[in-house]
Amino acid sequence: MALSWKHPIKDLLHGGDYNPEQWSPDVWREDIRLMKKARINCVSIGIFSWSHLEPEEGRYDFAWMDELIGLLSSNGIASVLATPSGARPPWLSQRYPEVLRVNDQGIRNLYGQRHNHCLTSPVYREKVAAINRRLAERYGANDSVILWHISNEFSGECHCDLCQSAFRDWLRRRYGTLDALNAAWWTSFWSHRYTDWNQIDAPSSRGDRVHGQNLAWQRFVTDQTVNFFNAEVAALREFDTKTPVTTNFMGAFPGLDYVEFARHLDIVSWDSYPRWHSDPHSDAAIGAETSFTHDLTRCLKRDQPFLLMESTPSQVNWQQVNKLKRPGMHQLSSLQAIAHGSDSVQYFQWRKSRGSCEKFHGAVVDHCGHENTRTFRDVTQLGETLAQLSQLPGSLVPARAAVIYDWNNRWAIDAYYGLRQDKKNYFEEVLQYYRGLWDLSISTDCVDESASLDRYQLVVAPMLYLLKPGMAEKLEAFVQRGGTLITSALTGLVDQDDLVFAGGAPGPLRKLLGLWVEETDALYDHDTVVVRPLKGLPSLQGEFAAREICERVHLETAVPLAVYGSQFYAGEPCLSENRFGQGSAYHVACRVEAKFTHALLRDIAARIGLQSNWSLPLPEGVNVQKRASAQGEFYFAMNFNPREVTLPAPAFPLRDELSGQPVTGPLSLPSYGVTVLRRD
Amino acid sequence: MALSWKHPIKDLLHGGDYNPEQWSPDVWREDIRLMKKARINCVSIGIFSWSHLEPEEGRYDFAWMDELIGLLSSNGIASVLATPSGARPPWLSQRYPEVLRVNDQGIRNLYGQRHNHCLTSPVYREKVAAINRRLAERYGANDSVILWHISNEFSGECHCDLCQSAFRDWLRRRYGTLDALNAAWWTSFWSHRYTDWNQIDAPSSRGDRVHGQNLAWQRFVTDQTVNFFNAEVAALREFDTKTPVTTNFMGAFPGLDYVEFARHLDIVSWDSYPRWHSDPHSDAAIGAETSFTHDLTRCLKRDQPFLLMESTPSQVNWQQVNKLKRPGMHQLSSLQAIAHGSDSVQYFQWRKSRGSCEKFHGAVVDHCGHENTRTFRDVTQLGETLAQLSQLPGSLVPARAAVIYDWNNRWAIDAYYGLRQDKKNYFEEVLQYYRGLWDLSISTDCVDESASLDRYQLVVAPMLYLLKPGMAEKLEAFVQRGGTLITSALTGLVDQDDLVFAGGAPGPLRKLLGLWVEETDALYDHDTVVVRPLKGLPSLQGEFAAREICERVHLETAVPLAVYGSQFYAGEPCLSENRFGQGSAYHVACRVEAKFTHALLRDIAARIGLQSNWSLPLPEGVNVQKRASAQGEFYFAMNFNPREVTLPAPAFPLRDELSGQPVTGPLSLPSYGVTVLRRD
Amino acid sequence: MALSWKHPIKDLLHGGDYNPEQWSPDVWREDIRLMKKARINCVSIGIFSWSHLEPEEGRYDFAWMDELIGLLSSNGIASVLATPSGARPPWLSQRYPEVLRVNDQGIRNLYGQRHNHCLTSPVYREKVAAINRRLAERYGANDSVILWHISNEFSGECHCDLCQSAFRDWLRRRYGTLDALNAAWWTSFWSHRYTDWNQIDAPSSRGDRVHGQNLAWQRFVTDQTVNFFNAEVAALREFDTKTPVTTNFMGAFPGLDYVEFARHLDIVSWDSYPRWHSDPHSDAAIGAETSFTHDLTRCLKRDQPFLLMESTPSQVNWQQVNKLKRPGMHQLSSLQAIAHGSDSVQYFQWRKSRGSCEKFHGAVVDHCGHENTRTFRDVTQLGETLAQLSQLPGSLVPARAAVIYDWNNRWAIDAYYGLRQDKKNYFEEVLQYYRGLWDLSISTDCVDESASLDRYQLVVAPMLYLLKPGMAEKLEAFVQRGGTLITSALTGLVDQDDLVFAGGAPGPLRKLLGLWVEETDALYDHDTVVVRPLKGLPSLQGEFAAREICERVHLETAVPLAVYGSQFYAGEPCLSENRFGQGSAYHVACRVEAKFTHALLRDIAARIGLQSNWSLPLPEGVNVQKRASAQGEFYFAMNFNPREVTLPAPAFPLRDELSGQPVTGPLSLPSYGVTVLRRD
C-alpha cells in the first residue's frame, strides 16, 4: 500500500525539522531559497512551538505560522505539522505542577528539558487537546499540511500519584482479581501476597522490582503513552479526519512496545542516528545494525512504506564522540533507508540553532549561514538523487525470512536475575543472527511474536525467553507446513507473566525442538567452550568457540548436528535439528561465535532455497537490498567499506536507475558507494 | 559441646529451605518422596510465610502448616521453623508506614523486597511478637520442630526519626555526657562540639561521617539488631523454653558484629555462597577464603559445632556470572563445611520457584520437577555420604593457631581517610595470612579481639588498626608466656573510639613489638619496593616485592629480619622480631607479596613446632582439616584442583571412613575430590 | 607592590594552620618551643574555632584566644586570624535550619562537614557578622594579628528557596527584561520562553541545564559568594580598617571565578596540594602544573606577591594514594612557590589531630609529638632557608608572555554538548601550551580575558571558546601593535551568553586569524590524523599526530604553515599564520601532540626574541623562574627529576644567594634539588 499525500507530492520526501520560531522572517526567506536549492520538498514544523503558539494560557497566536505555511506552500514545500506536546511552555508547569513528572524516588521534576510530562495528568491532556483542536481547525484542511507529527519521541515514565493510581486501574483491568495477580506475580515468594490493590506501587529502587510487576509496568507505560497519543489524535480528529498521523519512533528503543503503539498510527516513522565510523576499519557492523532497525521499523506496518523522519546531515552532538560523516556516507546512509522501505529522507535539523542544548547538532545550514559547505552540497546531491527515484514511492520489501525481536521478551530478559547478569545481550544476539542474513543479502523482516508467519520460509527466533500465549502453537504450525525455525539458548523459559513454565525450558516448544534443557551454564569471560560440528552441514567445518551461556540439553526426537568439545559436558549436543511435519526446527544451545551462526545460516538458506538479492558471494561489508512494486524491482547495492569493492556480475539483467546504463559485468562501487539498479 | 535435638536425629543434618506456600499439597507429597530419595532429614520452613500465616491483621491460618509439619514429621523429616519477620505482608506496610525503612537521604522506602523493616518501630516489634507467640505456642512443644530460625539474614539500617532517637539514647548510655562524646569524637575538629544530644544524627552523605560517629553508629546498628532479635526470642520463650534459636549469618558480612550478635544465639549458622570456578586454573583461592569464613563462623562459638544453613546445590542467581558447580564440587564444598565444624549441609533451596527474583537460583528440584538431573544425583550422593558420617556430629576443630579478624577494626579501617584510600584491603590482608596457614594445613581459629588467646601457640593479627581496651595487655601476656605474635603494617593506630594513640603507632604495642613508626608511605600501583631478607629464616631467600603500604619503623628492642632494598628508606627494617618474655613478636612493616608471608609462616611454624594436619609438603590447592571428639579423629583431605593429585603417605595410620579401607601409601584424590579419613 | 605587615615581620612568612582548640595549654607551650625550633614566624588560627568562641548563641569566650595570641606574640610569632564562618557550631544549624544547604534534588543537608552554609541565608549572615564584629573589636588593633583569613576555601552552592529567589533577582539585574533573557538563553529552543521570572530555577538534573542558564548560575554563585565575603569584611571593617583581608583559594578550582573574587581581596592566597611522585619517572608534569597554578594565582593581582596559605609538609589524606614527599621535595616544592611570587610558605597543618576526618593528613608535628622526624627536619631546614632570603619579599615576576585561562570560558566549555563530549579538556589544553613555555623557562603570566595585554610580546589563548565583549578588539589591538597571538581549535564560538556567533567560528576573530571554520571533526581514541609541517619553522620537522578534534578551516588572509596529511581533509591547513598590523596571529586548528606545540613555541619565541630565564637548552624536567625588585634579580633553578642534572653555565653572572658563592660554570642540581641565585 503506497502512502499518498494531499499535497501534490509524488516524489520521495526530502526535508527535515525546521524551527522557524528561532529565526526572523528575513531568515525564513533565505531558508526558502536554500531549501529550493537543496531540493527540499517537505519540512516538519511546530514541534517546539507551543510557547509561540500559546504565549499565555488561552491566548493563541497563529499569525506567524499562517505566514510560514503559506510561504512554504507557495514555494512547493509541504509541511509536516507537529502537535506541541513534546515540550510545554513554562507557564503551564508553573500553574499546574501536576504535569511535571515524579521519579521513582518520589521527587518531582522542576520545569525543564522536554518529553517530560506526566502520562496521566488530566490537566495536561486538556491543555494539549485544546491547542491540538485549534491546530486541526486551522490547518487540517490545508493541502500543504500533509501529515500530523504527534508530539515527539514519546518516552519515559512518571511515578506520581495519578500514574500510580492509573497503574492500579490498569492492573485491575488486566488481572480482574488480586488472586489472579498474586498467582501471575508469584507473590507467595517473599510473602508479597497483596490483599488490596492500593498496596501495589510502580517498580522502584526504593521498593520492589518483581519480574511480573516489572513486566506489567512496562506494558502499562506503553498503554498509557498510547492512551495519551490517542487523546491527542482524538482532538485533531474533531476537525480533521483525513490527514494521516504519525509519531517519530526511535528504532529498538526499549521503553515502549512499538508493535503495540504502531497499531494506532497511520504511518510509521523513525529517527535514525547510527554511530558511523566508530570502527576504523569498516562500517559493516553499524550498517547491519542500521539495516536491522530499518527493517524493524518497516515491519511495524509490513505492507506500506515508512518514513525516515530524522537523521543528521553531518554529525550529532549527544554521543560521546560526534564524528563527521565521511564523503559518500550521507548518500549511502540516506539511500540505505530508502532501500529498506522508507519513502523519505528527513533531517534533524534544517538550520543550526545559536543557543541551548543542540547548538552543535549537525544541520543542513550551519552557523556560517550559507550554502558553501560540504554538508549542504551532500544534501543537495541527495535531493537530486531522490528526485530521480520517482518510481520508488510505494514499493515494498519482499522478504521470505524473518527474525523475531519482541519488546515483551526484552523486558522480561532485562528484568531477570541470573546466569550472565551483566551480559543479557538480547539485542546483540538478535543482531548476530540478523547479520548472518545481511551478509548473504537476504531480505529479512523483523517482527515480534504477534506477527503472522505465513509468508516466510525461514524464521529465526533468538533467545525467545518469553512465549506469549499461542506462540508455541504458531511456530509449530509454521514448521509443520514446511517452514524452517532456528532458536537459540534461553528459549521458552517463561510465559506472558514471566512465570517459568512448569517442566522447564523450552516449555511448550519441547515437542517442536525435540529436546529439554537440564541446566544452563554461565561462563566467565575467560571461559570458552569448544563447539565441534558433526558431519552434514558443508560450511560448518573445524572448531568454534562458545562463550557466556551453554545449555545442557537432552535430545528427544531431535538429532545432533554439533557437540560440545570441552567442559564436563563435552560430547553433549549443542546444535540439533528436529524434523517436524514438513519442516525443521534447529536449536543452537549456546552463545557461539558469529562465524558459526553465519555458516549455519548459509547452509540452511542453501538447503531451503532461500534467495539472496544478489549472486553469491559478495565482498565483506557489501549489502544489497530490494524494493518492488508494479513500477518494477529496484536493487540497492551498498558498500560500507572505506575502499572500492567489486561485485560479481549480477545473475539477472539490471540497469542503473540514475544513469540508465545497463550493468553488463562486475559492478564497481567506490568507498561508501551506493547504486540503485532496476531489473530490466 | 555437641548439638542435641529434640527430634531423634543423630546424623548430620541434610536439607534446606523449603517454601511450601508456593506450592499445592500435591506438590508437597511429591516433595516428600523426593526428599526421602535424596536422604533429606530436615527442612527450613516459614521464612517467608507471614502472608500465609496471617493473611490479614489478626487473622491467623495455621492449618496448612499443621498439615505440612505433620507430613514431614511422619516421614522422618525434622523442621527448622522460622519466625517470619524477614519479609512482612503488604497489609502491614500499608497500615503502618513507620515499619518501612528510611534511607540516609531521608526518603522512606515503599513496600518491597525483604529484610527491610525499621530496626526500632514499636509497631513492627509488636506485630512480630504477636505472630511469634502464636508459632511458639503451637509448635514449640512439637519434637519435630528442632530449631528456631529467627528472621533471615539480618542486615541493613534505618534513618527514620525513631532510629535517630534510639541512636541518641544509645549514645547517652555509652558516653554518659556530651563532654565525653565530644572528647571521643574529637569534635573540636571542624567546630563540631555538640551541646545538645539532639544535634547528633546518624552518619549520612548529606551530613557527617565522622570517624567516631561512624563507629558508634555501626555499633548501634548491631545492638539495635540484636535488640530486635532478642525481642523476637522473648516472644517465643513465653511459650517454648527448650527449642534452641539461631539466625543465619553471612560470613564476614561487614554490617553487623557477629561476635557480639552470636552471644545471643544458642547455635551459630550461616549461608555460604563461594564463587567456585571463577579462576579457570584452580579453586584454591576460593577454597581458602571459604575455609576462612567457615572458621570465622565456627569461632563465634568455638566449643560447639555450627550449621551450614544455606548453600546452593548448583548455581546462584545474584552474582554477575552464575556458573554451574563442576562435577565433584558439590561433594567437596559440602564436606568442606563439615570439615570445618558444621553439623549440617543445608540448601537454599529445595524447589525452584516459578516466579520472582530468585527463580533462577539453583535448587535440589529444578523447574523440570523430577529427579533425573545431575544436581539431584549430586545431592543424593552427598546425602548418602552424610548418613555414613554418623560419628562426626559434635566433634570439634582443635586449633593451636589463630588469626584475628575484628569487626570494629574493619569499621574503623573502612572509615578512615588517607594512605591507600582506594585499597584499604583489611579482609584481603587477613586472608593472605590465613592462606599461609591453610597452605600448610594447620587448623586455625578466626577470632576477634575479645577472644581468649590461652589455647594458642601462634596468633596472627594483621592490620590491627584499632585496639580495644586491654588488647595490648592481652597480647603482651600471650607472648610473655611463650606465644608467638605476628603483626603487620597499620597496627596499633587508634583506640576504641577511633582516636589516634598519643605518641603514634603502634600505640600501646610499642613495648611488645619493640619499635615505633615514624611515617607510612602509600604507594601507587606502579610503585614497588624491594624487600630483602637478612639471614636467619631458611625459607626467606632472595628478593620480594612490597606494594601500597610501607611503614618506616625505628627498632628499639626488636632486631631486623628483613630490610627495604629500594626507595629512600632502603636499608631500613621491614620485618623484625622482638623477643618478649618466653615468646616473640614479629612485625611485618609493609604489604608484601604472599610468597613472603607464606614462607615466613612456614619458618615460624617450624620454629615453634606448630603441627600441620598432614605430613608436609602437600600439593598446591590441597587442604587437610581435622575434627576430633571422643568418637575419634577425622581428617578431611580436599583437592581444590580440577585435576588429580597425589598426597604423600600420611605420617600416622588412617582409615577411609566411608570404605573402611586403611590408607597404606600415597593418597590419590581425583579432580575436586575429597576423602574422609579416621585415625586408627 | 610589596606586602607590608603591622607586626615587625620582614622575612618571608613561614607557618601554617594551627588548631589550638584541639589541644590543652600544656601542648601550646610545647608547640611554641617546636615552632621556634622550626623557624616558624606566623600561624593561622581561628578557622574552626566558632564552637569554642561562641559555645552557645550569644555567649562568647575569648579568654583562651587572648592567652594564645599573647603567647604567640610574646614569642615573636604573628597570627593570621580567621573568621569562623567555614564551619558553624551544631547549635546554629539546630536552631536555624535555613543555614543548611539544599541540593539540586531539593533535599536539605543535615548538620555536618564544613563549607556548607547557604550562600543567602540572612540569619547566617547575621550570626557571622556578630562574631566577626567581636573578633575585629578585640583583635583588630593587635599588631601581631597581621591578616584576616576570611572563612575557608569558599566553595559550593545551595538550591534553597532563598537562593532561588536571589538568583532570580540577580537575573533581573543582569538582563533587565525577560525578553532580553529569552534572547540570551535562546529559549525559543524546546519552547522554553519564560513569561515570569519565577518560572526560572537554578540548573538541576531534575530540571534544566540550558547553556545560558548554566553560565548565569555559575556567575551568580560567584557573585553571591563574593557578596557573602563582602558582608563578612564589612563587619570587620566596622572595627578594623587597616588589617588586610584574604581568603584561601584553590588554584584552578572551577566553582568560582577567582578573577572576579580577587578584586575584593587585599592579598591573594591559595592552598597547593600537588600529586608529587604520581609518575614514577619524573615530576616534571606535576611541576609544570603546579607552576601554572602558582602563576594563575599570582596574576589575580599581578603587581604584588601572593601567599601560599596551605601546603602539606609530608603527605595528604584525601587523595586515592597519599604518597610521602621524597627527600628534597619539601624544599623544592616550597621554594617553587616562592619562585613564582609567593611571600610565604604555610602548612596545613602544624599538629596532626587525633581524631576525625583529617587525622592522617600530614603535619609538621606528627602523632609521635616530638621533633625527631624527617618531616620536622625538612620543615626546619626550609625555615632556615627562608630566613636567609630576606631580600626577596616584595619582589615580582616579570613576564612578557601570557597564557589565557578564563573561568567563564571553562564554564561554557564544560556545559556544551557535542564533539568530544567526554574529553572537553580545556584545562589540559591550556596546560599543554603553558608547558611549552615552562620547558623553555620563559616567565609566563596566566590571566583571563579581562586582563590588559599591554605588557606582553606573546599571548597564547588555547580553546578560547567564549569571547567576552571587547575581547576580539583587544586581541586585534595587541597584534596590531606587534604582539604575537596563538589560538587553537574551538576558538571564537560563542558570545558572553553562550550564543554561537552568527556566521560561525572563529566569530569576531575571523579577520584577525584570517580564516573561517567550516566544520569540526571529532575523532575516536583510535583515530589519528597526520599533521605535516610545511617549510618555514625550523623545529617543526617530520610528522606529528593530531587527535580528538580537527577543524576544517578555510584560509582567507592567513597562510598555511602545516597541513593535514590524512583523513578526507588531507592537504587542508591545520596551522596558519596571519600577519596583522605589526604582529602575527597563529591558529592551530587541531589537538596535536605536545612535541608539536612545544616546537612551535620554541620557534615563535626565537622569532620574536622572547627571553628565557636561562641559556638554552636546559635538561628535561628543569625549570628556572625569576623574581625581581629593587633588591635585585633572583633566579630559582629547580630540578624536578629524581636524579642529578647539570645545567649549562648561565649566560650572565650569578651568585648563590645562600652560600654567597659565584656560579662560574655548569650548575649541578641534585635529585629534586633547588638553588636560589642572584644576578651579580
Image (cartoon, coloured by chain):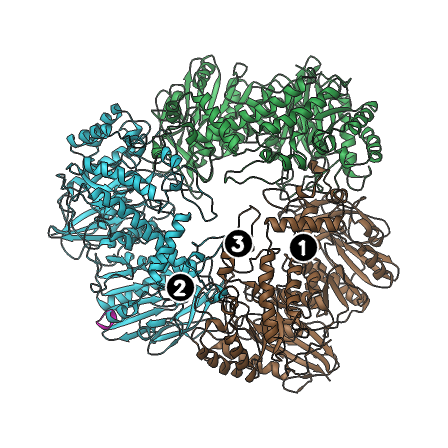
Chain colours: A green, B cyan, C brown
Can residue A559 be spotted in the picture? no
Picture residue at 44% right of the left edge, 24% below the top: A496
**Numbered disc 3: secondary structure:** helix
Q: Is residue B358 left or right of residue A304?
A: left
In depth, the one of B572 and C251 nearer the eye is C251
How crowded is the residue under tag 1: few (<14 C-alpha within 10 Å), some, or many (20+)? many
Judged from the image, the secondary structure of the residue bearing numbered disc 1 is helix
Chain containing the residue with disc 2:
B
Q: Which amino acid type is marked by label 2?
A: Leu
Q: Which residue is tagged 3?
A: C97
Chain for numbered disc 1 = C
Taking depth in this image into account, of C362 and A619 the one nearest to the observer is: C362
Say which residue appears at 46% left-offset and 61% top-offset: B417
Badges 2 and 3, same chain: no
The mark nearer the N terminus, 1 or 3, is: 3
Magenta highlight range: B478-482
In which quadrant will I find the C terminus of chain C? bottom right
Q: In this view, does C79 lie above or below B66?
A: below
Of badges 2 and 1, nearer the viewer stands 2
**In the shown orientation, is residue B232 left or right of residue A215?**
left
Residue located at (68% from left, 39% from top): A316
Q: Mark 1 points at which residue?
A: C426
- In x, y percent, where is residue C364? 50, 75
From this viewpoint, is residue B456 visible?
Answer: yes
Q: Which amino acid does label 3 sit on?
A: Pro
| Circle number at residue B178 | 2
Q: Mark 3 lies on which chain?
A: C
The answer to which image quadrant residue A12 occupies is top right
- Residue B201, image x, y percentages: 44, 55
CB-based contact (under 8 Å), mark 1 and mark 3: no
